[in-house]
Image (tube, grey):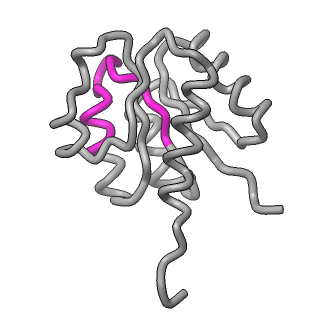
Amino acid sequence: MPDRTKILIVEDDNAMAQMCAKLLRRRGHSVLIANSGLDAVAIVRFGGDVDLVISDFRMPQMDGLQLVGRLHEIDSTLPVILMTGFASDVRVEHATKFGISDCVIKPFDPDGLLTSIDKVLRTRQVPASGV
C-alpha cells in the first residue's frame, strides 16, 4: 500500500480548515493545516514532503497567488489547488502564469473537491523516465 498523501490546507477560517481536514482524513490522506500563507511557506520549506497544497485565495498578509509563487520558489512541481468564494479571483491566465493546478469555488461540493484532488495527484504521480 502506498504512503498516505500529505496535503497542506492553508485557510484563515478555522471552521473551513477543519471541515476540509475532516473530509480529507476520512479519505485516507494525512493533513496539515496552516492558518496563513507565511505558515504554509515555513511548513513546506522546513517540514517538507507535502504532496499537495489546498489554499484559500483571499487571506491577510499573503493571498493565494502570492503563496503559489513563494511555494514554487521552494518546489516548482508542488501542485496547488486554490479555493475561493469569488469566481472572478482566479482566471485562466492566473492558472497559466502562476502554475495553479486547479481552482474550486466555495461553497463547494465535497465530491467536487475530492475529484479535483484526485485529478491533480494523478497528474503529479506520473513516474519520471529513467528512474
Q: Position of residue 34 (x, y in %)?
A: 53, 30
Q: Residue at x 29, y 15 (%)?
A: 87
Which of 48/1 is in front?
A: 1
The stretch drawn in magenta includes residue 106: no
Mark count: 0
Question: Residue 10, image x and y in percent?
Answer: 48, 29
Q: Quadrant of the N terminus?
A: bottom right
Q: Is residue 99 above or below residue 83?
A: below
- In the image, is 34 to the left or to the right of 65? right
Q: Residue furthest right?
A: 1
Query: Does residue 65 show up magenta in the picture?
Result: yes
Relative to residue 36, is residue 67 drawn left or right? left
- Which picture quadrant has residue 94? top left
Q: Which residues are magenta?
A: 53-69
121 displayed left or right of 90: right
Q: Position of residue 83 (x, y in %)?
A: 42, 23
Tell me what residue is drawn at x 50 percent, y 90 percent: 130
Decide which of 24, 34 is in the foreground and name it. 24
Quadrant for the C terminus in the image: bottom right
Query: Residue at image x 36%, y 57%?
Result: 74
Residue at x-position 56% and y-position 27%:
113
| Front position in the image: 61 or 20 | 20
User: Seen from this angle, which residue lies furthest bottom?
Assistant: 130
